[in-house]
Amino acid sequence: MNRSKRLAGQSVIVTGGTRGIGLEVALALASAGANVVVTGRNEPDLANVRQRADSTTDTGHIHGVLADVRLAEDCARVASVAVDRFGSVAALINNAGVAMRLVSEDFETSPTPFWDVGADAWRNIIDTNVSGVFYMSRFAIPLMLKRGKGRLVNVSSSPRMMRLPGWSPYGASKAAVESMTVTWAQELSGTGVTVNAVRPGGKVDTGLFPNGGRGALANAGFLAPSVLNSLLVWLLSESSDGITGRRFNANLWDAGQREDDAARAAMLPYPEEPYLF
Protein backbone atom coordinates (compact mmCIF):
# COMPACT_ATOMS: atom_id res chain seq x y z
CA MET A 1 0.00 0.00 0.00
CA ASN A 2 1.17 3.52 -0.80
CA ARG A 3 1.32 4.99 2.70
CA SER A 4 1.04 8.54 1.36
CA LYS A 5 -2.39 7.73 -0.08
CA ARG A 6 -3.79 5.23 2.42
CA LEU A 7 -6.64 7.61 3.37
CA ALA A 8 -7.28 8.75 -0.21
CA GLY A 9 -10.82 10.01 -0.73
CA GLN A 10 -11.78 9.99 2.94
CA SER A 11 -13.52 13.11 4.19
CA VAL A 12 -12.44 13.89 7.76
CA ILE A 13 -13.52 16.61 10.19
CA VAL A 14 -10.93 17.77 12.73
CA THR A 15 -12.31 20.20 15.29
CA GLY A 16 -9.88 22.71 16.71
CA GLY A 17 -7.67 22.00 13.71
CA THR A 18 -5.95 25.37 13.43
CA ARG A 19 -3.40 25.06 16.23
CA GLY A 20 -1.34 22.58 18.21
CA ILE A 21 -2.35 18.94 18.02
CA GLY A 22 -5.28 19.62 15.68
CA LEU A 23 -3.14 21.42 13.10
CA GLU A 24 -0.48 18.70 13.08
CA VAL A 25 -3.15 15.99 12.78
CA ALA A 26 -4.91 17.78 9.92
CA LEU A 27 -1.67 18.09 7.96
CA ALA A 28 -0.77 14.44 8.61
CA LEU A 29 -4.19 13.23 7.45
CA ALA A 30 -4.02 15.36 4.31
CA SER A 31 -0.54 14.00 3.60
CA ALA A 32 -2.06 10.50 3.83
CA GLY A 33 -4.60 11.47 1.16
CA ALA A 34 -7.60 12.54 3.24
CA ASN A 35 -9.73 15.59 2.50
CA VAL A 36 -9.87 17.44 5.79
CA VAL A 37 -12.33 20.01 7.10
CA VAL A 38 -10.86 21.86 10.07
CA THR A 39 -12.72 24.14 12.44
CA GLY A 40 -11.39 27.22 14.16
CA ARG A 41 -12.73 30.26 15.95
CA ASN A 42 -10.76 32.96 14.16
CA GLU A 43 -9.98 33.67 10.54
CA PRO A 44 -6.21 34.35 10.84
CA ASP A 45 -5.67 30.84 12.24
CA LEU A 46 -7.69 29.36 9.37
CA ALA A 47 -5.62 31.32 6.87
CA ASN A 48 -2.45 29.92 8.47
CA VAL A 49 -3.77 26.36 8.07
CA ARG A 50 -4.42 26.94 4.37
CA GLN A 51 -0.92 28.33 3.92
CA ARG A 52 0.69 25.41 5.77
CA ALA A 53 -1.37 22.91 3.77
CA ASP A 54 -0.39 24.46 0.44
CA SER A 55 3.30 24.21 1.31
CA THR A 56 3.42 20.79 2.99
CA THR A 57 0.79 18.51 1.43
CA ASP A 58 0.33 17.40 -2.17
CA THR A 59 -2.23 14.62 -1.80
CA GLY A 60 -5.36 15.45 0.22
CA HIS A 61 -6.96 18.84 0.69
CA ILE A 62 -7.71 20.99 3.73
CA HIS A 63 -10.71 23.29 3.98
CA GLY A 64 -11.15 25.62 6.96
CA VAL A 65 -14.51 26.53 8.47
CA LEU A 66 -15.02 29.36 10.93
CA ALA A 67 -17.04 27.63 13.65
CA ASP A 68 -17.48 27.35 17.40
CA VAL A 69 -18.17 23.80 18.62
CA ARG A 70 -20.00 25.22 21.62
CA LEU A 71 -22.83 26.09 19.21
CA ALA A 72 -24.95 23.24 17.85
CA GLU A 73 -25.84 25.25 14.74
CA ASP A 74 -22.16 25.72 13.91
CA CYS A 75 -21.53 21.98 14.23
CA ALA A 76 -24.45 21.26 11.90
CA ARG A 77 -22.96 23.69 9.38
CA VAL A 78 -19.51 22.06 9.58
CA ALA A 79 -21.00 18.65 8.76
CA SER A 80 -22.95 20.18 5.88
CA VAL A 81 -19.81 21.86 4.49
CA ALA A 82 -17.92 18.56 4.62
CA VAL A 83 -20.64 16.85 2.59
CA ASP A 84 -20.99 19.70 0.11
CA ARG A 85 -17.26 20.01 -0.46
CA PHE A 86 -16.06 16.39 -0.20
CA GLY A 87 -19.22 14.29 -0.60
CA SER A 88 -19.44 12.61 2.80
CA VAL A 89 -18.06 12.36 6.32
CA ALA A 90 -15.92 9.27 6.84
CA ALA A 91 -14.39 10.30 10.15
CA LEU A 92 -14.59 12.86 12.92
CA ILE A 93 -11.79 13.72 15.31
CA ASN A 94 -13.12 15.65 18.28
CA ASN A 95 -9.96 17.53 19.15
CA ALA A 96 -11.18 21.04 20.05
CA GLY A 97 -10.55 21.71 23.70
CA VAL A 98 -9.77 24.33 26.30
CA ALA A 99 -8.18 23.86 29.69
CA MET A 100 -7.20 25.46 32.94
CA ARG A 101 -5.76 28.72 31.59
CA LEU A 102 -9.36 29.91 31.47
CA VAL A 103 -9.41 29.62 35.26
CA SER A 104 -5.97 30.99 36.09
CA GLU A 105 -2.62 31.59 34.38
CA ASP A 106 -0.79 30.04 37.33
CA PHE A 107 -3.01 26.96 37.61
CA GLU A 108 0.02 24.64 37.73
CA THR A 109 1.70 26.35 40.69
CA SER A 110 -1.40 27.68 42.51
CA PRO A 111 -4.34 25.36 41.71
CA THR A 112 -7.78 26.92 42.14
CA PRO A 113 -10.20 25.00 44.43
CA PHE A 114 -13.49 24.24 42.74
CA TRP A 115 -15.46 26.72 44.85
CA ASP A 116 -13.30 29.57 43.53
CA VAL A 117 -13.67 28.61 39.86
CA GLY A 118 -15.64 31.27 38.00
CA ALA A 119 -18.94 30.25 36.45
CA ASP A 120 -17.90 31.56 33.02
CA ALA A 121 -14.66 29.55 33.05
CA TRP A 122 -16.50 26.39 34.11
CA ARG A 123 -19.15 26.88 31.43
CA ASN A 124 -16.58 27.54 28.70
CA ILE A 125 -14.56 24.39 29.51
CA ILE A 126 -17.59 22.11 29.77
CA ASP A 127 -19.33 23.61 26.73
CA THR A 128 -16.21 23.17 24.58
CA ASN A 129 -14.86 19.85 25.83
CA VAL A 130 -18.15 18.03 26.45
CA SER A 131 -21.03 19.70 24.63
CA GLY A 132 -18.83 20.36 21.60
CA VAL A 133 -18.01 16.65 21.35
CA PHE A 134 -21.70 15.78 21.62
CA TYR A 135 -22.92 18.38 19.10
CA MET A 136 -20.33 17.58 16.45
CA SER A 137 -20.81 13.82 16.85
CA ARG A 138 -24.59 14.19 16.77
CA PHE A 139 -24.41 15.66 13.26
CA ALA A 140 -21.55 13.56 11.90
CA ILE A 141 -22.61 10.09 13.03
CA PRO A 142 -25.84 9.90 10.92
CA LEU A 143 -23.70 10.64 7.85
CA MET A 144 -21.37 7.76 8.73
CA LEU A 145 -24.31 5.44 9.37
CA LYS A 146 -25.61 6.30 5.92
CA ARG A 147 -22.25 5.17 4.48
CA GLY A 148 -22.28 2.02 6.63
CA LYS A 149 -18.82 2.81 7.93
CA GLY A 150 -17.01 5.52 9.86
CA ARG A 151 -14.56 6.51 12.54
CA LEU A 152 -15.22 8.68 15.58
CA VAL A 153 -12.16 9.55 17.66
CA ASN A 154 -12.31 11.61 20.84
CA VAL A 155 -9.17 13.26 22.21
CA SER A 156 -9.02 12.66 25.94
CA SER A 157 -6.52 12.88 28.79
CA SER A 158 -5.04 10.68 31.49
CA PRO A 159 -6.90 9.48 34.62
CA ARG A 160 -4.40 11.48 36.69
CA MET A 161 -5.56 14.71 35.05
CA MET A 162 -9.16 13.76 35.76
CA ARG A 163 -8.43 13.63 39.50
CA LEU A 164 -5.78 16.30 39.92
CA PRO A 165 -6.68 18.77 42.72
CA GLY A 166 -7.46 22.19 41.28
CA TRP A 167 -8.24 20.83 37.82
CA SER A 168 -11.87 19.88 38.38
CA PRO A 169 -13.43 21.62 35.31
CA TYR A 170 -10.93 20.04 32.91
CA GLY A 171 -10.87 16.70 34.71
CA ALA A 172 -14.65 16.45 34.74
CA SER A 173 -14.81 17.30 31.04
CA LYS A 174 -12.36 14.58 30.04
CA ALA A 175 -14.00 12.00 32.31
CA ALA A 176 -17.22 12.78 30.44
CA VAL A 177 -15.45 12.27 27.12
CA GLU A 178 -14.19 8.86 28.26
CA SER A 179 -17.71 7.88 29.35
CA MET A 180 -19.28 9.05 26.09
CA THR A 181 -16.67 7.15 24.10
CA VAL A 182 -17.32 3.76 25.65
CA THR A 183 -21.10 4.30 25.73
CA TRP A 184 -21.33 5.39 22.10
CA ALA A 185 -19.13 2.49 21.01
CA GLN A 186 -21.72 0.11 22.48
CA GLU A 187 -24.62 1.98 20.89
CA LEU A 188 -22.91 1.86 17.48
CA SER A 189 -21.83 -1.77 17.74
CA GLY A 190 -22.48 -3.65 14.50
CA THR A 191 -23.03 -0.53 12.41
CA GLY A 192 -19.57 -0.26 10.90
CA VAL A 193 -18.89 2.94 12.85
CA THR A 194 -16.18 2.69 15.51
CA VAL A 195 -15.60 4.98 18.48
CA ASN A 196 -12.28 5.27 20.30
CA ALA A 197 -10.47 7.66 22.63
CA VAL A 198 -6.87 8.78 22.22
CA ARG A 199 -4.59 10.49 24.72
CA PRO A 200 -1.27 12.22 24.08
CA GLY A 201 0.24 10.56 27.16
CA GLY A 202 1.68 13.68 28.74
CA LYS A 203 1.89 17.47 28.53
CA VAL A 204 1.90 18.65 24.91
CA ASP A 205 3.69 21.75 23.68
CA THR A 206 0.55 23.79 22.96
CA GLY A 207 -1.07 26.97 24.15
CA LEU A 208 -3.04 25.06 26.78
CA PHE A 209 -0.02 25.70 29.02
CA PRO A 210 1.40 29.17 29.75
CA ASN A 211 4.90 28.09 28.73
CA GLY A 212 3.75 25.88 25.84
CA GLY A 213 3.16 26.48 22.17
CA ARG A 214 6.51 28.08 21.52
CA GLY A 215 8.64 25.08 20.71
CA ALA A 216 9.26 23.94 24.27
CA LEU A 217 12.00 21.35 24.58
CA ALA A 218 11.26 17.74 25.41
CA ASN A 219 13.52 18.02 28.45
CA ALA A 220 11.08 20.63 29.79
CA GLY A 221 8.51 17.84 30.05
CA PHE A 222 6.59 18.48 26.85
CA LEU A 223 5.57 16.15 24.03
CA ALA A 224 5.55 17.39 20.44
CA PRO A 225 2.12 18.44 19.03
CA SER A 226 2.59 15.75 16.37
CA VAL A 227 2.46 12.99 19.02
CA LEU A 228 -0.97 11.74 17.85
CA ASN A 229 -0.26 11.75 14.10
CA SER A 230 0.81 8.16 13.43
CA LEU A 231 -1.80 6.69 15.76
CA LEU A 232 -4.64 8.68 14.18
CA VAL A 233 -3.64 7.85 10.62
CA TRP A 234 -3.69 4.19 11.64
CA LEU A 235 -7.04 4.51 13.44
CA LEU A 236 -8.65 6.06 10.36
CA SER A 237 -7.25 3.40 8.04
CA GLU A 238 -8.62 -0.04 7.23
CA SER A 239 -6.00 -1.51 9.55
CA SER A 240 -8.17 -0.60 12.57
CA ASP A 241 -11.39 -2.18 11.27
CA GLY A 242 -13.46 -3.60 14.13
CA ILE A 243 -11.51 -1.90 16.93
CA THR A 244 -13.95 0.12 19.00
CA GLY A 245 -14.55 1.32 22.54
CA ARG A 246 -10.84 1.42 23.28
CA ARG A 247 -8.38 3.93 24.74
CA PHE A 248 -4.99 4.60 23.19
CA ASN A 249 -1.97 6.35 24.69
CA ALA A 250 -0.08 7.96 21.79
CA ASN A 251 3.14 8.33 23.74
CA LEU A 252 3.39 4.53 23.81
CA TRP A 253 3.46 4.34 20.00
CA ASP A 254 6.81 2.92 18.89
CA ALA A 255 7.65 4.12 15.39
CA GLY A 256 10.25 1.38 15.15
CA GLN A 257 7.61 -1.36 15.18
CA ARG A 258 5.15 -2.54 12.56
CA GLU A 259 2.09 -0.29 12.73
CA ASP A 260 -0.27 -2.96 14.02
CA ASP A 261 2.20 -3.88 16.74
CA ALA A 262 2.73 -0.24 17.65
CA ALA A 263 -1.03 0.25 17.90
CA ARG A 264 -1.40 -2.83 20.07
CA ALA A 265 1.29 -1.51 22.42
CA ALA A 266 -0.45 1.87 22.62
CA MET A 267 -3.86 0.32 23.37
CA LEU A 268 -4.65 0.58 27.07
CA PRO A 269 -6.12 -2.41 28.94
CA TYR A 270 -9.50 -2.60 30.64
CA PRO A 271 -9.97 -2.07 33.52
CA GLU A 272 -7.28 0.56 33.62
CA GLU A 273 -4.97 1.08 36.59
CA PRO A 274 -5.33 3.07 38.69
CA TYR A 275 -9.06 2.70 38.91
CA LEU A 276 -11.02 5.90 38.55
CA PHE A 277 -13.40 4.94 41.34
Image: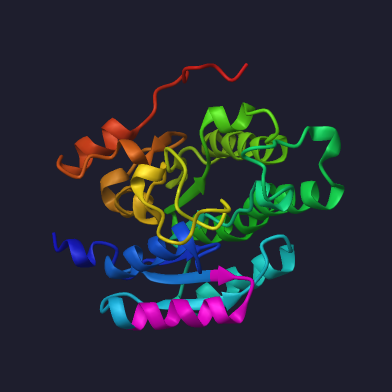
- Snapshot colouring: rainbow
Compared with 140, 155 (above or below) is above
Give coordinates of residue 132: x percent, y percent: 66, 55
* Quarter of the image where one finds residue 72: bottom right
Compared with 199, 127 (above or below) is below
Q: Is residue 41 magenta?
A: yes
Q: Is residue 96 magenta?
A: no
Q: Relative to the observer, which residue lies in front, 79 or 189?
A: 79
Give coordinates of residue 162: x percent, y percent: 61, 31
Left or right side of 40 for 3: left
Give the main secondary structure of the magenta stretch: helix
Q: Relative to the observer, which residue lies in front, 67 or 44?
A: 44
Compared with 45, 133 (above or below) is above
Residue at (29% x, 50% y) in the render: 234
Image quadrant for the N terminus?
A: bottom left
Q: Relative to the observer, which residue lies in front, 30 or 229?
A: 229
Compared with 5, 42 (above or below) is below
Left or right side of 268 for 146: right
Left or right side of 200 for 134: right
* Quarter of the image where one finds residue 86: bottom left
Label total for image: 0
Q: Which region shows up in magenta?
A: 39-54
Give coordinates of residue 106: x percent, y percent: 67, 45
Can residue 232 be spotted in the picture? no
Can residue 105 be spotted in the picture? yes
